[in-house]
Amino acid sequence: MIGQSLPGRRTGSAARRDRACHLVRGIMLGVLAGLPIGLFAEEPHRSPVAVAVRPGTTEALTANSTAGSVSWIDWSSGKIIQELTVGSRPWDVKWLNANRAIVALADADQVALLIWPDSKGQIQRKIIDIGDEPSALAIGPREGIAYVALTGTDEVIELDTGTGNVLRRFATGGLPRSVAISPNGNWLITCSNVPGEVTVHDLATGELLSRRKIFDDGFNLGHPAITADSSKLILPHIVNRGFAVTRGNIEIGWVLDNRVTRLPLPAGEKADQQQMGLDIRHDAVGDVHQALLNSDETQLVVSASGTHELLVLRFQDIPWPPGDSGDFAPKELRNAPDRYRRIKLGGRPLGIAWESPTSLLVANGHRDSIQVVDLTNDTVAREIALGGPATPSPARLGEMVFTDADWSLHSWYSCQTCHPSGGTAGQIFDTRNDGGYGLPKLIPPLTGVAQTGPWTWHGWQKDLTAAMKVSLEESMSTTRKITDHEAEVLVAYLETLKPPVSPHRQQDGSLTPLAEAGRELFVGKAACADCHAGDTFTTDDVFRVGLEGPRDRYKGYNPPSLRGLHARRRFLHDGRARSVEEVLREWHKPEELNGAALTDDEREALVAYLKSL
């Protein structure tokens, strides 16, 4: 449904979020009226995550994830032309043409269209409800057609921005995080996180042409670059090496690696996939995010948000290893600044866009700014401040620690690496949180974690601040001395992480009839509420559930909260299950715990309820 420049009545999960955020919405309406945010409330951080250049101009738009706005800037003058409100958590922005732009609103389940007037007048905003958690955008070859990755439903939609109609749906891997159209206009390319895989669809027919998993357990797949002839995809990502999280293994790259992968398009054999490491021993790269090729394909640029830098590689001279890439950058690149250099920017550089063949715009989330980076001398030529409070709050300071890979040994990874946006990367890691090594565990989400103690899968950690110190000292092997203040601000950030709102409810927020039947089973016949109780759907007890191993030091498990269950793609302590249905059918049968056996129809109802939480 399309609304006009001011929002009308909203429905579904978007409406539920509006009721919870009416104050923020009022502030945003003030911005629409041309009034500064500061007149209505404390100045918010902008936290830009994406930037898009307006065709044929020196102007750009930024997606400001924590201010619910986009900033319209002129980088040549260094000025903000206007800040426009758009909605809850802008996560990507693209220009449809020189006078129309589209913004993905991840928390509102919407996109916003911004339409520049032909004559003097206000910029129009139109809202389209599209589905659960739009996370990335791509613009198709046909006028007015956009492609939107919906993380919540594992699909990409083809959207007619003129009518607001969804024309087609393309199934993807779990949690799609980036989407692109090949330069020849033939292929829709989607990069998904759980599992880490790339899907390619024929844009004309909708046919799935290939589905390729990034090997060595690739995850946190970033935004790819595509060669001009549409023959190759260049993808930044992280690799889970699968070894125990010990200090020695971290140091030699046997826990996590940051890499770029080259894939042929539109399809290819597994042997055609080539990877190259980006890390330098004792000076690794953290949290690669986006790749870009310049117009003559002489330079590949990758943003690395965890280590606050841009990586610049001479593209034609990249020595793509024929087999295993190893855990470090190839020796041909080490100490060869003409082939591989690193530009320190500070803050949290995320989205990047070319301003000219030798200059980049960088959306720096933690500097609340757009940086103009000159690649001829590797300097920040200009920095455009987007606005923000003079003094960061404890939660903001905690977020900075959370996303900073320099807190790990030699900067290999951050808290954000395993818990993107406070959720879960869906990976298995072997840490000492279960009392020793040899029993890898699934990374749990941190949304709602401040209200769901005790912590760890076995529930032995009773103090969340102490747990932060343990994570930094053991899981990240930090060499820094951790102060109480640093642990406390991390907890302050965790307290801001709320479980995602489920889209599996009716428009007024109530349960569907099927989910209501499932609720009765949850508290009754299935007896799930014996362990998953109260508003948080957990307890502070530990239960034996038949999944214990003979080497477990701690016997039994603390039940994880079921809030936001719909947003997960792996389940149980070791990630063995890939769906809620599989959990109930194979590994966590009610009749083998406190409940009774369910029929197929009852199990379907119970799943509907669990996905509504």
Image (tube, helix red, strand yellow):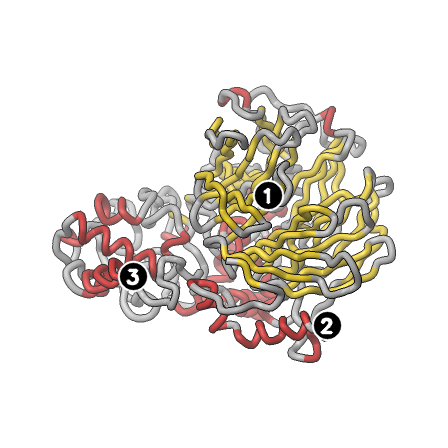
- State whether residue 470 is above or below residue 351: below
- Judged by depth in the image, the label closer to the viewer, 3 or 1, is 1
In primary-sequence order, the first of circles 3 and 1 is 1
Which mark is drawn over residue 115?
Answer: none
Q: Amino acid at mark 2?
A: Gly
Compared across the picture, whether 341 is left or right of 381 comes to left
From this viewpoint, is residue 541 visible? yes
Q: Is residue 66 visible?
A: no
For marks 3 and 2, the one nearer the N-term is 2
Q: CA distance from mark 3 to mark 2?
A: 41 Å
Secondary structure, mark 3, is loop
| Local crowd size for mark 3, using a 10 Å CA cut-off: few (<14), some (14–19), many (≥20) | some
Who's the residue at 60% across and 36% down the image? 181
Give whichever of 448, 205 is nearer the camera. Answer: 205
Going from the N terminus, do you reach mark 2 or mark 1 first? 2
Mark 1: amino acid: Ile
Say which residue label 2 marks.
Answer: 34
Residue 398: x and y in percent read: 58, 65
| Nearer the observer, 47 or 279 | 47
Q: Which residue is mark 3?
A: 512
Identify the residue at image location x=74%, y=58%.
117
In contact (CB < 8 Å): disc 3 and disc 2: no
User: Horizontal and vertical percent for residue 161?
Assistant: 58, 49
Question: Which residue occupies the foreground of this view, 408 or 348?
Answer: 348
Q: Amino acid under label 3?
A: Thr
Q: Is residue 575 left or right of residue 281?
A: left
Vertical side of 560 occupied by 168: above or below: above
Viewport quadrant of the C terminus: bottom left
Badge 1 is on which residue? Answer: 145
